[in-house]
Image (cartoon, rainbow, N blue to C red):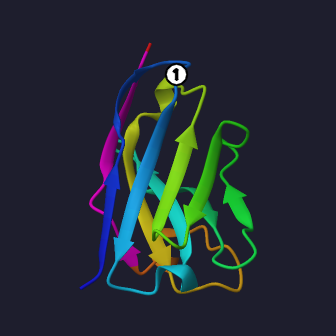
Amino acid sequence: EVHLVESGGGLVQAGGSLRLSCAGSGFTFEDTTAGWFRQAPGKEREGVSCISPTDGSTYYAASVKGRFTISRDNVKNMMYLQMTNLKREDTAVYYCAASTLSTYTPAYAYEYHYWGQGTQVTVSS
């Protein structure tokens, strides 16, 4: 059975940092593109970042580029999202996801096959 489990969310002040983690199991993690998405109340789920399984190619949404860093550990079946200089508009439920598409860096939710349950990130002013 496939599982993706996020951890590391919470409440942080604007300008602060958080590190999200996601543990994958039940599938061949090292063969999948790993991604992070977020969904704020009343808004659609949006792609934040993703990282390829092979050469480490990454994608970042313009809104987080330079502040967030995605990484993965294929030995531990883990993916991470280091978030710095957090802003109130980063407040959302963050989801980790995995895609079997690996020849490019998929940025859209429909391109992902496995999903975590989500973790809340709240940035206060």
Relative placement, left or right, of 97 versus 68 is: left
Extreme-front residue of the structure: 75
Q: What residue is at 27 percent from the left and 60 percent from the top?
A: 117
Relative placement, left or right, of 6 versus 111 is: left
Q: Is residue 109 above or below residue 11?
A: below
**Which of the pair 41/65 is nearer the observer?**
65
Which stretch did the figure color magenta? 114-124
Q: Position of residue 116 (x, y in %)?
A: 32, 64
Q: Position of residue 19 (x, y in %)?
A: 48, 40
Q: Residues within 10 Å of mark 1 (few under 14, many from 20)?
A: some
Q: Is residue 86 above or below residue 79?
A: above
The residue beneath circle 1 is 16
Q: What residue is at 50 percent from the left and 30 percent from the top?
A: 89
**Which of the pair 38/11 is nearer the observer?**
11
Could you say whether the residue bearing mark 1 is in a helix, strand or loop?
loop
Classify residue 41 by image quadrant.
Answer: top left
Classify residue 113 by image quadrant.
Answer: bottom left
Q: Is residue 26 above or below residue 20?
A: below
Q: Amino acid at mark 1?
A: Gly
Our reading of the magenta stretch's main secondary structure is strand
Q: What residue is at 54 percent from the left and 69 percent from the top?
A: 34
Q: Is residue 119 magenta?
A: yes
Q: Position of residue 1 (x, y in %)?
A: 23, 85
The answer to whether residue 108 is visible is: yes
Q: Is residue 48 magenta?
A: no
Q: Position of residue 43 (x, y in %)?
A: 40, 47
The answer to whether residue 41 is visible is: no
